[in-house]
Structure formats: structure tokens, C-alpha cells
Amino acid sequence: MKVALFGGTGFVGTYITEELLKNNHNPHLLVRPGSEYKVFQPDKCKINIGDIRDLKTIEITLKDTDAVIYNIGIIRQFPKKGITFEAIHFEGAKHCIDVANHLGKKRFILMSANGVNLMELSTNQQNF
């Protein structure tokens, strides 16, 4: 199976890539410029360099895939670069879902980070 993986160079994403390869799947990864070196077994993955905020890049990554895994999460923001929790955790995921729906993708896994609002704790965070 060809699986589009967003967030494949992160801590969890590296393990997902490894499991996909172990089970004879073909990972199609979207990675940020400069992160290509973090890809687990890059010779066995299709690597697209781009940005989750770019719909065309998402479409290219999803092309000819059978399933989608969205696993992008940031732990700090860089507002001057447009890298915010809202832009990545919410808008990035929404863009990916919208493009996947447009392309008729039926298998979609979304793994999310806690909250997108810096002004208040999420309900989950309030319980700790």
C-alpha cells in the first residue's frame, strides 16, 4: 500500500515510517526543506519537499496513495515565520483533510497535538 505520511521525520513519525517499511508499504513523505536527512531509510521512501501550508504540495504528496497519516506536531512556535500551533495543528490538518477528500481518499488517520490556543488550556490539559 502507498501511504502518504505527514510528519514522518519527527519522533513518532520515524517509528511510523519504520513500521510501514517493515510491513512492505511504500511511504510518501512530505518533509520541510532541510529535513530530508531525517528520513528513515530515504532510499525506500518517496520524499516530497514542501510545506503543509501549501495545498499544491499536499496534493502532490497524496497523488497515487491509498491511505493518509497526518502526524505533524510542533512543540514551539515561530510566529514571525508563520509557524504557529493554529497554522500547523489546525489549519495544516484541515488543508490535508480537504485535499484528501477532494482526491477521494477513503483512509485517513489523524494524530493530533494538544490544543491550538495559547490563551487558555485545552480541556485535556485542564484535567492534569
Image: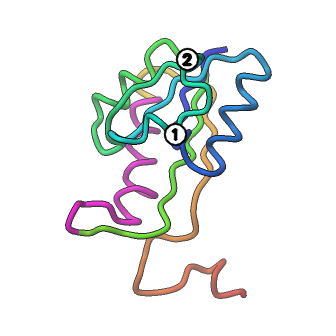
**Residue at far left of view:** 80
- Left or right placement of residue 29 versus residue 12 in this view: left
Q: Nearer the viewer, residue 4 or 99?
A: 4
Secondary structure beneath disc 2? helix
Instruction: Give the secondary structure at mark 1.
Output: helix
Local packing at callout 1 (Cα closer than 10 Å; few below 14, some 14-19, many 20+) is few
Magenta stretch encompasses residue 104: no
Seen at 54% across and 27% down, the residue is 4
Residue 8 vertical position relative to residue 24 in the rendered view, above or below? below
Residue 15: horizontal and vertical position, in percent? 71, 41
Q: Position of residue 84 (x, y in %)?
A: 34, 65
Q: Is residue 88 left or right of residue 12?
A: left
Q: Can you tell which quarter of the image residue 66 is in?
A: top right
Using the image, determine if residue 90 lies above or below residue 19: below
Vertical relation: 66 (above or below) 81: above
Report the disc number at residue 43: 2
Q: Residue 14 location in percent, x, y?
A: 64, 41
Amino acid type at mark 2: Asp
Q: Are marks 2 and 1 in contact (CB under 8 Å)?
A: no
The residue under label 1 is 38
- Dominant secondary-structure state across the stretch colored magenta: helix
- Inspect the image, locate mark 1, and give the three-letter code of the amino acid beneath it: Lys
* Quadrant occupied by the C terminus: bottom right
The label number, if any, that marks residue 69 in the structure image: none
Residue density around tag 2, few if under 14, some if 14–19, many if 20 or more, within 10 Å? few
The residue lying furthest to the right in this view is: 23
At horizontal 54% and vertical 24% (from top left) the residue drawn is 42
**Residue at the spot 62% in from the left edge and 80% down from the top edge:** 123
